[in-house]
């Protein structure tokens, strides 16, 4: 890692630490401090987990797809997760769904999601890797398919059950499932460490299939492992806050802009830190300063959508 | 030596290669020539394990391509395909440095850095080393890709149409560089080339392909004749001599 990268990382870590302190201690009244601090700490941990998961998932996915505009959610990863939840509600009913042990269910979700994602997107990327437009189209169509099947199932559900489905299909940074946090956080740490260890190989993977094969990287295996990590990370973030379409795009774009280097050893931590700074800072602003007058997820999507258009118009799709 | 036996290959139902058996001699420059769609690139890609083998067997310096671990093959041969678009934003020096990957797996040493500097220098890229790939011309990017394969420092170098986008002087410099690798370091080179006169001027061994079959192979002087070439390209082609080498003319 060069000096510039290290300096950027150091500054960003400081900024995040400052924001976290602000989040924890700003406006702490004389009341039940222990209770408030606990509440805030849980939420802070959730925000950071989600931010890191989305950021790293996006960076990894863009490397596999050799494309800077695609994100896991544009390709329907989180729609797949929501579809799975809808299916569970349909199969088990409300009581059954709510009665599932949170951590166990989540572990199972992640397992199934990873398997599905590897099969679906693995075949897609292995076969269509040379045909990027076809791959994007297929991914987008898959995403739409997953969403419409969820939507259809939602229509035939009774309203009570539908409200459960609805709560998992929209992003909300206010409603965080605290029970899941230890498992989700643990999985995120493991996945990010794995990605970090693979960083030099990911650099080679980013060159594209032919150069990577020529340089002796086991391309197929590396693609599948990377997709599995993406699936784990997307499951984590979707389970905690719901699908967030454009956030990953913003932070991946920011990371590339901040670094001007394509090395994953730098990209991964910078994207993760940028995401954490945006989420913690943004949520603090909306919750404490603007009194919940708007929701962060809406603003994130709006800004992300604009950024996506900007990338499209700049011709960054390749 | 690269030994190819009974190689067949299909792409989407079309038979691209029919039962090919041939070899690339060691320590020589082997040129694959032939009309578009003859299967030259497919053959080279199969040797370089860019596409999986369907039928037949290929060994590179004794390593069975379908069974040898790909990391090991990367230290025996370097292959440069035709598709060279890269999504990530890289400086030329970074791209060339990737050529050392098979030797250091992510932890470059002083030796690796020296080899990269040498490769940049060999292809006159040192002044451009800090430019980004999307900020240089197509020919300069092509040279950077070749320099990457060159930095890989393997006994075998396989290049699919390396002269694409290169002007006359850089094409000539590349061929001279390859010739030098062969003559002074005992390396071996296989390349697909469309401009026959580059094969005529620099190649030792020529393999002429048409419709997925080998039409002729052997010394450049024996293959690059009026009879073979006219038949190969279905067009009247004249072959003269210039400085002891064949000179192929299309305006016969």
Image (tube, coloured by chain):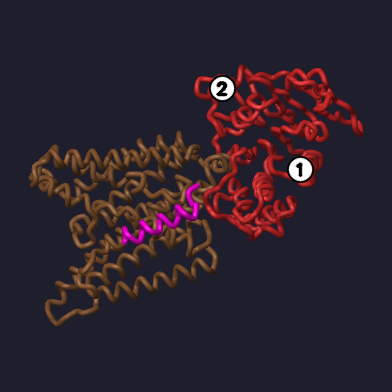
Q: Is residue A226 above or below residue B18?
A: below
Residue B151 visible? The answer is no
**Chain painted in brown in the figure:** A
Asked if residue B183 shows in the view, the reply is yes
- For the point 20% across and 72% down, the residue is A291
Residue bearing mark 1:
B171
Q: Nearer the viewer, mark 2 or mark 1?
A: 1
As drawn, is A5 to the left or to the right of B114? left
Q: Is residue A207 left or right of residue B129?
A: left
Chain drawn red in the picture? B
- What residue lies at 40% left-to-right and 59% top-to-bottom? A307
Query: For mark 2, what is the residue?
Result: B9
* Residues at marks 2 and 1, CA–CA distance in whole angstroms: 31 Å
- Magenta stretch, main secondary structure, is helix
Subunit of mark 2? Answer: B
> In the rendered view, does B42 fall on the left or right side of B167?
left
User: Which segment did they paint magenta?
Assistant: A300-318
């Amino acid at each position: 890692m060069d000096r510039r990268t290290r300096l950027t990382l150091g500054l960003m870590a400081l900024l995040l630490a400052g924001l976290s302190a602000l989040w924890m201690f700003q406006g702490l009244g004389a009341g039940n401090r222990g209770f408030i601090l606990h509440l805030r700490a849980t939420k802070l941990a959730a925000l950071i987990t989600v931010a890191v998961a989305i950021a790293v998932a996006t960076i990894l996915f863009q490397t596999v797809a050799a494309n800077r505009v695609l994100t896991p959610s544009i390709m329907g990863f989180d729609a797949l997760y929501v579809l799975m939840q809808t299916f569970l509600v349909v199969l088990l009913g409300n009581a059954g769904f709510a009665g599932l042990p949170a951590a166990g269910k989540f572990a199972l979700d992640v397992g199934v999601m990873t398997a599905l994602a590897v099969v679906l997107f693995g075949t897609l990327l292995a076969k269509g890797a040379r045909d990027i437009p076809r791959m994007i189209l297929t991914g987008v169509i898959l995403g739409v398919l997953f969403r419409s099947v969820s939507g259809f199932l939602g229509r035939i559900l009774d309203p009570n059950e539908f409200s459960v489905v609805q709560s998992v299909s929209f992003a909300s940074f206010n409603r965080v499932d605290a029970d899941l946090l230890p498992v989700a956080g643990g999985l995120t740490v493991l996945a990010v460490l794995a990605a970090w260890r693979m960083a030099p190989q990911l650099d080679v993977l980013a060159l594209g299939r032919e150069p990577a094969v020529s340089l002796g990287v086991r391309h197929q295996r590396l693609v599948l492992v990377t997709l599995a990590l993406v699936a784990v990370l997307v499951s984590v973030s979707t389970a905690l806050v719901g699908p967030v379409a454009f956030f990953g795009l913003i932070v991946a774009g920011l990371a590339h802009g901040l670094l001007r280097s394509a090395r994953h050893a730098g990209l991964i931590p910078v994207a993760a830190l940028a995401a954490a700074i945006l989420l913690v800072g943004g949520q603090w602003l909306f919750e404490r300063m603007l009194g919940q007058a708007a929701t962060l997820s809406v603003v994130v999507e709006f800004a992300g959508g604009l950024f996506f258009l900007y990338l499209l118009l700049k011709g960054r799709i390749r | 030596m690269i030994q190819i036996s009974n190689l067949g290959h299909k792409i989407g139902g079309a038979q691209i290669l029919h039962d090919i058996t041939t070899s690339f001699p060691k320590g020589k420059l082997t040129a694959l020539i032939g009309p578009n769609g003859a299967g030259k690139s497919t053959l080279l890609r199969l040797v370089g394990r860019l596409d999986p083998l369907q039928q037949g067997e290929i060994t590179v310096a004794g390593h069975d391509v379908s069974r040898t671990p790909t990391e090991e093959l990367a230290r025996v041969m370097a292959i440069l395909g035709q598709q060279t678009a890269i999504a990530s934003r890289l400086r030329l020096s970074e791209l060339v440095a990737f050529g050392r990957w098979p030797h250091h797996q992510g932890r470059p040493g002083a030796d690796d850095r020296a080899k990269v500097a040498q490769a940049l220098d060999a292809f006159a890229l040192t002044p451009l080393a800090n430019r980004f790939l999307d900020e240089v011309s197509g020919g300069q990017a092509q040279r950077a890709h070749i320099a990457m394969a060159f930095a890989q420092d393997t006994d075998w170098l396989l290049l699919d149409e390396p002269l694409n986008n290169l002007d006359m002087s850089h094409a000539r410099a590349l061929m001279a560089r390859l010739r030098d690798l062969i003559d002074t370091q005992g390396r071996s080179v296989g390349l697909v080339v469309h401009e026959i006169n580059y094969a005529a001027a620099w190649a030792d061994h020529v393999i002429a392909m048409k419709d997925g079959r080998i039409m002729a192979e052997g010394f450049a002087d024996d293959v690059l004749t009026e009879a073979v070439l006219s038949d190969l390209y279905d067009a009247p082609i004249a072959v003269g001599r210039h400085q002891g080498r064949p000179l192929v003319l299309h305006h016969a």
